[in-house]
Amino acid sequence: MAAILRIEEWDRDARLAELGLSRDLLSEVVDACVAADGDCTANDPPMARGMKVYFAGVRRLRELLGPEGWEKDDTGGFSTVVNHDRRVRVAFMNTDNSTCDPAALLPINRSRKGPNSERAASVNQVLLPGIEWVSVRSDGSRPPADDYATWHMCVHIDGDRVRAELALLSGFEAGYFTDCRERIFLISDGEWGGFSGSPPDDDIGPEIEIEVRRK
C-alpha cells in the first residue's frame, strides 16, 4: 500500500498539530543541520558530515521539544524525543534524495541501521496513523516506549539543496527501511530560504571597534 502523502500546506499543518509539532519548529531543526553540514571541510574524516548533521538534528529536536513537554530518551542506544500523552516519539535520520519526492516510495537512510530501527518499523506496521492513544493505563502506569509510534525526521542536504520530511517508516530489511505508512513533507527543493527564527543576541550585527585616544 502506498504511503499517505501530506504535501498540501493545510493537510501538513493539521497533521503536525495532531502530533504536537509544527513546520516552523522542525524548520529550526533543519537550520541546525545545515549549519553543521556547512561546518565540515575537506580535512574532516569521511564520516564527519553525516555524524555532525545527525548530532545537530537530535540535539536541536530535544532543545526545542523539551520545553513543549517532550522527554529525551536513549533507551537501548536509540536516541529519540518522546511525547507520552500522544504515545509518539521522533528520531532523526540522514536520508537520500528520495526525501520529499512524491514519486519515491520512501526516504532511504544513508547509513545502515540496527535492531532498534527494525523494532520501531515493526511496531509502526501494526499502529494506525492518527489513532488517539490514552496517556496512561488503567493502573496509572505509562506504557513502555516500544508501544509508541516512531516518526523519523528525515533530512537530505546536498550543497544548497535541502529537503526534509517526517516519515512513519514501517518496513525494514538488511539495515535499511523498505516501507512507509505516512509521509509529511516539510521542505522540498527550493523551499529552504535560509535560516529561520531569531538570531542569537550575540549575532545581531557586526562588531564595531571604538578607538580610544589618551588626551
Image (cartoon, rainbow, N blue to C red):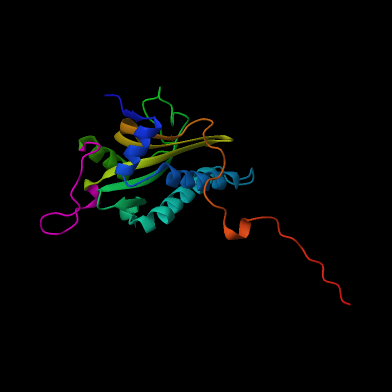
Q: Nearer the viewer, residue 157 or 67?
A: 67
In-image side of 65 versus 32 (left or right): left
| Res 42 quadrant in image | top right
Counting labels gives 0
Magenta highlight on residue 23: no
Determine the residue located farthest toward the right in the rendered image.
Answer: 215
Q: In which quadrant will I find the N terminus?
A: top left
| Res 124 quadrant in image | top left
Residue sitting at x 63%, y 45% = 41
| Res. 133 in view | yes
Residue sitting at x 28%, y 47% = 88
Residue 83 coordinates in the image, percent (x, y): 29, 52
Determine the residue located farthest toward the bottom in the rendered image.
Answer: 215
| Res 112 quadrant in image | top left
Q: Is the magenta stretch mostly helix, strand or loop?
A: loop
Determine the residue located farthest toward the front in the rendered image.
Answer: 10
Magenta highlight on residue 130: yes
Residue 37 coordinates in the image, percent (x, y): 56, 44
Residue 126 coordinates in the image, percent (x, y): 20, 36
Residue 24 coordinates in the image, percent (x, y): 45, 44
In-image side of 51 versus 159 (left or right): left
What are the residue bounds of the magenta stretch?
127-146
